[in-house]
Image (cartoon, rainbow, N blue to C red):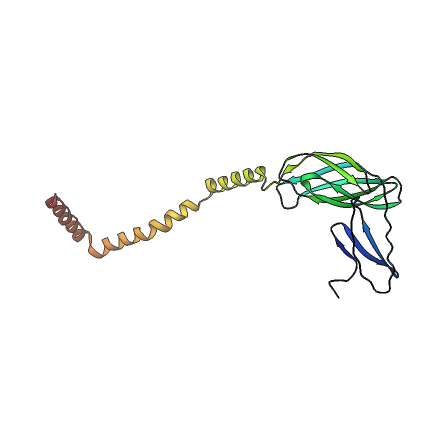
Amino acid sequence: MKDTALPQTEAGIEISTEENDILTKTTSSSLVAIHLQFEGQTIQRVEKDDICTISEISISGCYSCSKGAMVKVKCEAKSNQRIEAMINYGTLGINFVECHKNGHPTQFTVFSSLKRINSSCFSQCGKKKIKFQLDGTLAEEVKFHMKQVRENFVGVSKYWNNSTLWEDVIKAVLGPLTNLWNGLINWLGTTTFIIVIIIGSLMVFHLL
């Protein structure tokens, strides 16, 4: 029951209910065959033919990015107070928008890998296609700000130059070695240490 619950929309055809009636709506001007089977029901098809004009066209956002670009248009129907139109944006895809006799603004997201958009488009809410042009320049998605990177780099450089960290490291490494050296001298005694140095020097000289 869930799979066949109304409203249903597929391939530009919407099947919905209104009180006790079942309505089908399509914006395609081509011949469409719709097969419905309802026992004890009357089926009536109402087709609207209108001319939908697109104005106030703009595109903004980024290219090759996850959030995409935002397209804004205003759709005006010539005859009907309210009708749905199909907009074909070429390589940017197809969208269905709502059109009013006095014009209706709408916006939606598209995705493009091109920075410069120059697309020939058309709108259709009946037999006639109305052409329009979508032009714009998209921005590159900013991964990070170079100004912030420079400020952080300068800050770190100043820290290293002014910091006593290197002095602390040298003390930590040389301190135990110095203590070991002094302890060895004290344990052997000065005289014994000199004798050990002389013997070591003679052994090295003998090996050479």
- Left or right of 31? Residue 185 is left
Farthest residue in the left direction? 206
- Left or right of 164? Residue 57 is right
Q: Residue at x 44, y 46 (%)?
A: 165
Residues 48 and 71: in front is 48
Q: Residue 187 location, x and y as percent?
A: 22, 57
Q: Residue 54 location, x and y as percent?
A: 80, 37
Tally of numbered tags? 0
Q: Quadrant of the N terminus?
A: bottom right
Residues 14 and 171: in front is 14
Q: Residue at x 82, y 54 (%)?
A: 24
Q: Quadrant of residue 146?
A: top right
Q: Quadrant of the C terminus?
A: top left
Residues 182 and 177: in front is 177
Q: Residue 101 location, x and y as percent?
A: 88, 41
Q: Quadrant of residue 76?
A: top right
Q: Residue 170 location, x and y as percent?
A: 37, 47
Farthest residue in the bottom direction? 1
Q: Residue at x 70, y 45 (%)?
A: 109
Residues 97 and 35: in front is 35
In the rendered image of this protein, does residue 172 appear above or below residue 154? Answer: below
Q: Residue at x 14, y 50 (%)?
A: 195
In the rendered image of this protein, does residue 44 appear above or below residue 128? Answer: below
